[in-house]
Amino acid sequence: MTSHSKVIIADYTNPLHTNDLILLLNYYALDPMGDNQPLAEMVKQNLVGELAKIPKAFSLLCYVNNKAAGLINCF
């Protein structure tokens, strides 16, 4: 079985992109490198809006077989 992957620039106004960004960041937070704690609800609700306010900030989302698989936030 072959996999299909793509990398896109996240649109902070696109609900799918914002949900996937929060989902992936939450997975990181739950890892030992992220302190084994889920993101606080306030963070989940405000993070993407705050990212959008930062000049020249952008996020890349990677999808494998149409499922969010990775991200990078760039500043």
Image (spheres, rainbow, N blue to C red):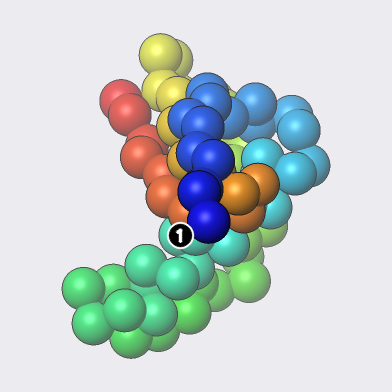
Tell me which amino acid carries mark 1.
Answer: Leu
Q: Nearer the viewer, residue 11 or 4?
A: 4
Name the residue at 58% across, 62% down.
Answer: 23
Q: Which residue is mark 1?
A: 25
Give the farthest residue toward the right: 15
Residue 64, image x, y percentages: 53, 48
Using the image as rendered, state which of residue 14 and residue 53 is in the foreground: 14
Q: Residue furthest front?
A: 1
- The reply, left or right, for residue 59 in relation to residue 21 is left
Q: Is residue 15 visible?
A: yes
Q: Quadrant of residue 43?
A: bottom right
In the rendering, at what x and y percent does residue 18 appear? 66, 44
Mark 1 is surrounded, within 10 Å at the Cα level, by few (under 14), some (14 to 19) or many (20 or more) other residues, namely some
Look at the picture and state if 68 lies above or below 11: below
Q: Quadrant of the C terminus?
A: top left
Residue lying farthest to the top in this orientation? 56
Asked if residue 1 is positioned above or below residue 64 in the image, the reply reads below
Q: Residue at x 65, y 47 (%)?
A: 66
Question: In this orientation, which residue lies closer to the viewer: 67 or 56?
Answer: 67
Residue 69 screen position, x and y as percent: 48, 54
Residue 22 in view in this figure: no
For residue 35, side relative to residue 41 (left or right): left
At horizontal 33% and vertical 85% (from top left) the residue drawn is 36
From the viewer's perspective, is residue 41 above or below residue 17? below
Residue 34 picture location, percent across and down: 28, 72
- The relative height of residue 54 versus residue 71 in the rendered view (above or below) is above
Number of numbered discs on residues: 1
What secondary structure is marked by label 1?
A: helix
